[in-house]
Every structure is written in C-alpha cells, then in structure tokens.
C-alpha cells in the first residue's frame, strides 16, 4: 500500500501527541482522514470460520484454544472441505465479501498446507476474497498459498514488542514479523492488528500502532480486538478496556494507516451501539459478521442489521461499490446455519 499520503516513519512522540488530543479533535482528525481515503458510510464485512479448533501448543494467555489452559471448548480436527465450501457459500449469500479460515496451529505442516490450498482454491472459485490464519509461515509456504489465489493472511502482532513477552513465551515478536514479511514478499495482502485488554498500558497500544504503521508496506487490514475473557485462560480476570481508550486506538490506527481497513473484531458484542458508532466515526470500516460462535459470542445478526440501518451504513461488495440490494437486508433466516468462530484473531 504505497502512496504519498502514507507515512512509514511515525515516532512514538508523534503518535502519543495524536492519541492525547481532546476526544472531539481526535475524532475530527480521524474523520477527515477517513473521508479522504474511504467512503465514510460503507463497511466491509468478513466472515470467519474455524477450520480446526483447539489443541494449539502455543501459550497465548488470552486464547481458549491453547492446549495449556483448561477451557470449555470443543476440540475439532480439520474440517472436511465440503463443510467449508457450504459455509463459504452461505457467507456469500449473507453479504460477506471475504471468507476467513482460521486454524489453531503453531505453524503450517506440508500436509496441512495441501489441505488449505484446496480450501483456498474452492472458496476463491465461489467469488469470495480468501483469508487464512494458520500460525507461522515460511516464505515458500506463503508463495504456495499465493499461487492458489490467497488474498489475505492474518497474523496479529497482538501488542507492543516489550509487552509481548508477557503474553506469549512460545514464540517471539520477531517470529511474528518474519511471517508478515514472508506474506508480503509472496504478494499476499497482510491482515495484522492486536488485542486490547491483555493488561498492557496505553503506551503498548501506541507502540503496536507504530510497528504496524511503520512496516515498509502498511497492512491492508488492521483488526483491533477487545479481549474476550475466556474462563480457564490466564487473562480471564483481566479488567475491561476503557471504552474511550479503545476508541482512541481506533482513531490512531485510522490516522496512522489512512488507507487500511480497520476492523472491529473480537469483543464487539461487549460494545453497545453508541460505542460501535463512535468506532465507525473514528475510522473503523470493517467488521466480522455472524452470531454463532464456538467460544465466544458476537453481535447478533438482527442487532447488526438494526444498527447498520440506524446509521445508514452500507456494506461493500467485492468491487467496493455499494451492495444496495443486499447490504442491510441480509436474510436472517439464512444465517442460522453458519458456524462462525470469532476468536481473538
Ligand atoms: S492465538 Fe493462535 S497460536 Fe495462540 S494459542 Fe490461540 S490458536 Fe494457538
């Protein structure tokens, strides 16, 4: 995402100064930038499906899928291709433009790579954008995924480099950055963001935005999660993130990464309509959509439809134009069978 408006040398001081603006000034600045690069009244919708749930050897302290924590999730082996195709078809009918597939793996094995390649081919053939999140990738694996049509790879940095060591000990921040580089080098678009509520300070959030914004090419997609506190994980008792702090981070992401899609991701069901509306005003322009979750709940379909109607926000179709006929008239009845896993992703 190279553009003369894009700045890749943000200092902490500059970002801190923006973050500390009076709230109204911050949102005004974010809106100005948002309107310059995006349609202010459209959002992108992604659907996320867990293709392999639980049993992950990593120790991410927020995650219900780590084998190290005693959480109440149903372990599932890699789902058969037919199930994935069915759900991708359903997601498309329901208005999603991108279908994201997540697997609880530390890294991708050759055997699993072949399965995922097949999934990407089939989902792509349905006319959907494809995204996967599979753990760490080598450069050759990234290229193989690119060759079968993968559009996006999600790999979050989670938090600042300094605080990351408190959150995950089984891999390093540099491991994360290396995977992002392999993805970028292969020509796959990057989806990378973080989670607020891990016990980090505001400065860690600002540093996270700095690292993402200062990547040679900024991520096309930046998911900002609000921690979903899952019983059994070390962060179950964490305090909730202050709502205004969360909105400030959204605005900061928008200002520092003007062309990126900033996504409200996990934890959206804990945000009331007013908070979500302020997030949209601050520059969020993408959401995960779907109400049936494996480990946590998301906003209900009905609720999302009502909110989008009230705000007169339309959804984007694949060509980035308004999808007037389907935008907020998504058929609720058709959504019942979707099995979507919105996790901290
Ligand atoms: S966040 Fe991903 S890598 Fe970490 S434990 Fe969960 S599934 Fe594994």
Image (cartoon, grey):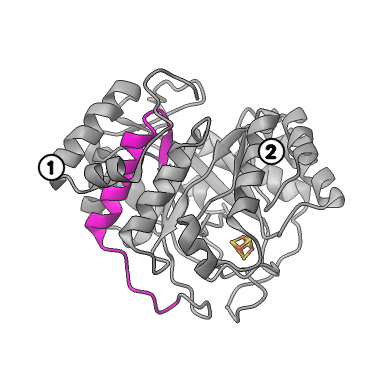
**Residue 249 belongs to the span the image colors magenta:** yes
Identify the residue position indicated by label 1 in the image: 24
Of the residues under marks 2 and 1, which one precedes in the sequence?
1
Identify the residue position indicated by label 2 in the image: 182
Mark 2 vs mark 1: give the one in front.
Answer: 2
Answer whether residue 232 is visible to the viewer in this image. Answer: yes
Residue 111 at x, y percent in the picture: 87, 51
Identify the image quadrant of residue 284: top left
Q: Is residue 335 above or below residue 220?
A: below
At 84% from the left and 44% from the top, the residue drawn is 114
Q: Which mark is residue 134?
A: none
At 62% from the left and 42% from the top, the residue drawn is 180
The total of numbered circles placed on residues is: 2
Q: Is residue 292 above or below residue 324?
A: below
Local secondary structure at mark 1: helix
Residue 249 at x, y percent in the picture: 31, 49
**Residue 247 belongs to the span the image colors magenta:** yes
Q: Which residues are magenta?
A: 236-262
Relative to 241, 186 lies left or right: right
């Amino acid at each position: 995402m190279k553009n003369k408006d894009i700045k890749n040398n943000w200092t902490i001081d500059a970002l801190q100064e923006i973050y500390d603006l009076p709230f109204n000034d911050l949102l005004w600045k974010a809106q100005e930038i948002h309107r310059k690069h995006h349609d202010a009244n459209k959002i992108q919708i992604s659907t996320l499906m867990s293709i392999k749930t639980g049993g992950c050897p990593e120790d991410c302290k927020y995650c219900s899928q780590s084998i190290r924590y005693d959480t109440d999730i149903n372990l599932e082996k890699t789902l058969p291709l037919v199930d994935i195709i069915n759900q991708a078809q359903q997601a498309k009918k329901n208005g999603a433009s991108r279908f994201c597939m997540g697997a609880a793996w530390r890294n991708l094995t050759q055997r699993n790579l072949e399965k995922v390649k097949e999934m990407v081919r089939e989902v792509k053939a349905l006319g959907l954008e494809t995204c996967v999140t599979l753990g760490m990738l080598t450069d050759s694996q990234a290229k193989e995924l690119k060759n079968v049509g993968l559009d996006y790879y999600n790999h979050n940095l989670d938090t600042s480099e300094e605080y990351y060591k408190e959150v995950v000990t089984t891999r390093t921040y540099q491991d994360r950055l290396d995977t992002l580089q392999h993805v970028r080098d292969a020509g796959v678009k990057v989806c990378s963001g973080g989670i607020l509520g891990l016990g980090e300070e505001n400065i860690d959030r600002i540093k996270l935005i700095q690292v993402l914004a200062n990547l040679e090419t900024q991520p096309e997609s930046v998911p900002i999660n609000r921690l979903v506190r899952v019983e059994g994980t070390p962060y179950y008792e964490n305090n909730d993130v202050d709502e205004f702090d969360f909105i400030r981070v959204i605005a900061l992401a928008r200002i520092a990464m003007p062309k990126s899609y900033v996504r409200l991701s996990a934890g959206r069901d804990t945000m009331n309509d007013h908070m979500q509306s302020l997030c949209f005003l601050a520059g969020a322009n993408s959401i995960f959509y779907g109400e049936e979750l494996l480990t946590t709940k998301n906003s209900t379909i009905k609720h999302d439809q009502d909110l989008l109607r009230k705000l007169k926000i339309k959804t984007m179709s694949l060509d980035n134009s308004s999808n007037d006929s389907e935008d907020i008239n998504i058929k609720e009845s058709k959504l019942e069978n979707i099995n979507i896993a919105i996790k901290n992703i």
